[in-house]
Image: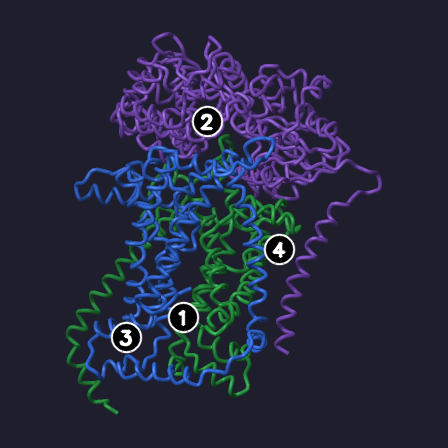
Chain colours: A green, B blue, C purple
Amino acid sequence: MSQTKVINNHIKESKSRIVFRIINTILLASICLIVIIPIWNVVITSFAEDKDVMGGVYLMIPKSFTLKNYAKVLQSGYMDGFLNSLFVAVSGTILAMVVTVPMGFVLAQKHLVGRNVLMKLVTITMVFDAGLIPFYVLIKNLGMIDSYLSLILPFAVSTFNLIIIKNFMTSIPKSLIESAKLDGCNDFTALIRIVLPLSVPILAAVTLFYFVSFWNRYTEVVMFINSNSKYTLQVMLRALVFQSDGSLGDNNIVYDNMKMAVMVLGMLPVLIIYPFVQRYFVSGLLLGGVKE
Amino acid sequence: MQRKKTSFKGAKNEKNSIAPKKRSIWSTIYNQRYLWFMILPGLIWFIVFKYCTYAGLTFAFTNYGFRDEVSFVGLRNFSRLFQSSVFWNAFRNTIIISLCNIIFYFPFPLIVALMINELKSLFAKRAVQFMIYIPYFFSWVVVGCIFVTLLSPSSGVVNKILNSFGFDSIYFLADTNWFRPTLIVSYIWRQMGYGAVIYVATLATVDPQLYEAASIDGCGRFRKMLYVTLPSIKSTIVTMLLLNLSHVLLIFEQVLVMYNSSVYSVSDVLQTYAYREGILSGNIAYSTAVSLFVGVVSLCLVLGTNFASKKFLDDSVL
Amino acid sequence: MKKVTTMVLILAMVVSMLSACGKDKGGNTSADGTKKVELSLSSADNTFGYCTDADLQKAVTKMLEEKTGTSLKTIIPPVSSYNEKVETMIAGGDVPDIFCVSQAMTKLPNYIARGKVLKLNDYIAKSEKLSSIPQELYDAISVDGGIYHIPYQYPKVKIIYLRKDIMEQYGINLSNTPTTDEFITEMSKLKGTGIIPFSFPKWIDNFQYFMNSFDAYAGIYQNVNGEYVDGFQEPQMMDALNYLRELYTNGIIDQEFITTENATMREYVYTGKAASALDYTTNYTNYVSQSKAAGAETDVYPIYAILGPNGKGGGLNESVQTAFAISADCKNPEKAIEVLETLIFDEEMYPTFFNVGVEGEHYTVDENGFLAPTEKAANSGYKPTFTFLYETFLDEFKVNFKPSPEIQESLSSQNMIMDEAQLQKGPKYAIPSGVSDTYDEVAASITSTWKEIVSQVVLGTVSAEEGMENYKDFWKSVNGDTILKELNDK
């Protein structure tokens, strides 16, 4: 309706806007640079020859290029660990989302009987941690020691992610759900048809958080798993690197280049899925109009 | 904007006025049966995997892991705790480090997310998001390795830069004045992307109509941010603050991989103390007492923030 | 309809939980025909053939099972998390029947006080083989005459290795047992060369090597009069601290030692970036072969001890570093003892389990009689370290291959160094646990406090006097004098 006014506004502030955008871009670029420099070092070190990394050199400019380190890591049963990790992370993330999302939705319904009590109970779990030993005893009593289940079930809900989801869903206007109910939806179908499509960005973010946390889990894997054939990638890779840090010396020293190759290969799979998840962060834009 | 708000409130009032007739609680629960079915798996999970382990918190009142016979010792572990100078040192460090983390880390992801939001090109948006998120994929052990080499006085790039400006090398990880700043910077470095993702995801859902309306009202960029963006993601900001507060005292792995004996006095935190006493020395009961103490303090922090949020922002997170 | 979906979900969870239980039980009843004794055995992944591959580890287990007629359930955590895993299992009531205790001198007394490990005196007395282990290694961690462990090897000793090429180039002239002053003067010749004279890792307890020169001992110990004293407050500790500080200010100790890992320390010496390091006697051949691999070949020169003003000094003694213990709940201790006898005294089993692995699985023997790792082993961190085997209690162990020519060459010097270092090793006192409640409660804090103070003094954050004052304050706050009283009254 007032198209012209908007355009006028744009023209009016265009100068300050350009300055603002330049400053903004420079600031963001420098932030990215600070983030990237240490990672850059990791990457080029992982491609370097032994002789270039011996004795703690900090590489900023690549001196040599070899795939030897990667080849070595990939041959060392990497695939087994990778598949274990993938299985645990994928099934864990699916289970986690299936449990967390409905729960977050329900807790967002202010009219739920006993909601306050439930929220208090949930909050308590966020700050109290009984520690590893009681956790181990529980897993033992459930008969899950040395089973993949011990890596999936106990981590099906992260109170953190639950509250993030719950909070997001609280901000979805209640009127939408009410009107859906008038159209014959129950709470469950309302969640599926109305709330989930509106929450895509946050669901994408939480999925990513879950996946990364399953992928990077280390301590619990070592504590709950006894068979080496079930170890996840993180445990395997760390064993490969830190064996030589044990007090004894040994024949094959693990130089930094190998260490860095291990680090890169450990996170590469999650890095690859990131762009796929990322596209959903903005899809909410399209749906934004539906909200009112 | 203002108009819109009142109309929303009006709608609320209207709904209240046609409040449902008094019904028995059971019939309400029956009406909410779908909700209950949906929450059931989660509840079972919480009971089994969280509340069952809390039985272990009773270790704090025993001498578990100390002698052959486990016996109930009442509050002895706590009285020992409060008499120990190492504990108080760890407590002080935890508070200082947590406070600095909240003050310096907390605004960072928000600012970065807002900056990203201002970028025009979608590609640039995604590229920046992607880059700042990469460190989060590294576990703390790896981040520890990265910072040790990065900050090495003789070969690390940070000290090279300092030297080129004529400054002396600083041994960041062994200097009691520099260790905490290093912890905080590395924390920001790794966690910035994580926080930013949540804000970016929330920003994506801000109704574009609101921006248009603000433009019509003659709002500039900055005022739009102030009057549209921030209020729209207000509850997310409070949630993030609350979540940060809930685990800020639990800082552990990061310190464990970065500290060394020369900086214990400024870096030893409650969780590392509990770890040394418990898992490393077998004094499980005592370390549980430390955890319990941390939990109580965290709970106070979280409930306090929630109360403040309810009072001042009229919006309860929990 | 939706209700059904939810129900299915819950059911799925419950069923998967139950199936897990079922699986677990199924695994336990794998008795094949003859009834074998079932035992669980835990040791870090730097044993079991020193290789992270599950199949190869199984091959080692199989050999052990065949030799002992047992059915073993093995738990092989990564070495970097081994202690945590053991503590979790023990505290969680899941003590493995047989388990390896690393850092036995500090860990085992705690397990004993908690009644988690079996008293072995009778079993040792009955076993001819186990009785042949030197009594002092049993006594090192005994409580009231009760023995709860079987030592795995002779004590590990650390001495200083100095690169001979650097010695010659810069005219460093040191005997095998130089004095503290000589060490400083000679090593100072490297000032300004860019070479780190003495590379050191972040493990503060390794400073004990230099404390030995002053007859100082960090930690509580029983002195010559049979009286328990706190070594850190003895007057000679002050001299040791001042000497360490002097080493640091003279640029002899690596200025960045507090962030240096063991592996990095070795790397520095291999590459010639550092002139010397403190390391296990068994690593002698590694220094020779690795410096060659790094393109800076040299021989290394052992310094067994640095003699202080009173002529005292000695190598860093780790005493019983690695030992095996048997769970107090073990149903068949006789069989467990048999397994341990086989692990420690079987000529074939000992090298196989420790780090060589199984022929045909981990390695093959080539036509010249040398070891050639199989592809599978080479790809999973297999690192047979032949020289480590020599710390065994066996007179001779049996392997089907000849050590590589380089190792053969350095073997005689290596064994000479090992023998000499055993003679010159410094003291190591077991921590008297289970006697004084006050001590057991604060033992961890005492250790972390003296380590903090030593590192601060060396780095110059505080002076030795200030450090000692801080320590005394701490000592008072934990009722240190009560600890000594309780220990001495016993």
Looking at the rendered image, the disc whose residue lies closer to the viewer, 2 or 1, is 1
Q: Share a chain, discs 2 and 4?
A: no
Which chain does tag 2 point to?
C
Q: CA distance from mark 4 to mark 1?
A: 31 Å
**Residue C413 percent across, percent down from the top left:** 51, 17
User: Helix, strand, or loop for circle 2?
Assistant: helix
The reply to whether discs 3 and 1 touch (Cβ–Cβ < 8 Å) is no
**Residue C64 percent across, percent down from the top left:** 71, 33
The reply to whether discs 4 and 3 touch (Cβ–Cβ < 8 Å) is no
A198 shown above or below A72:
below
Residue annotated with mark 2: C287
Which chain does tag 1 point to?
A
Q: Share a chain, discs 3 and 1?
A: no
* Sequence-wise first label, 4 or 1: 4
Query: Looking at the image, which residue is at 66% across and 61% down?
Result: C14
Looking at the rendered image, the disc whose residue lies closer to the viewer, 4 or 1, is 4
Tag 4: residue type?
Leu
A216 or C288, which lies in front? A216
Is any part of residue B257 visible from this angle?
A: no
The reply to whether discs 4 and 1 touch (Cβ–Cβ < 8 Å) is no
Residue annotated with mark 4: A149
Residue annotated with mark 3: B228
Query: Looking at the image, which residue is at 38% across and 79% down?
Result: A288
Tag 2: residue type?
Tyr
Tag 3: residue type?
Val
Q: Share a chain, discs 3 and 2?
A: no
Q: CA distance from mark 3 to mark 2?
A: 67 Å
Which chain does tag 4 point to?
A
Which chain does tag 3 point to?
B
Q: CA distance from mark 3 to mark 1?
A: 19 Å
Query: Looking at the image, which residue is at 66% across and 15% down?
Result: C132
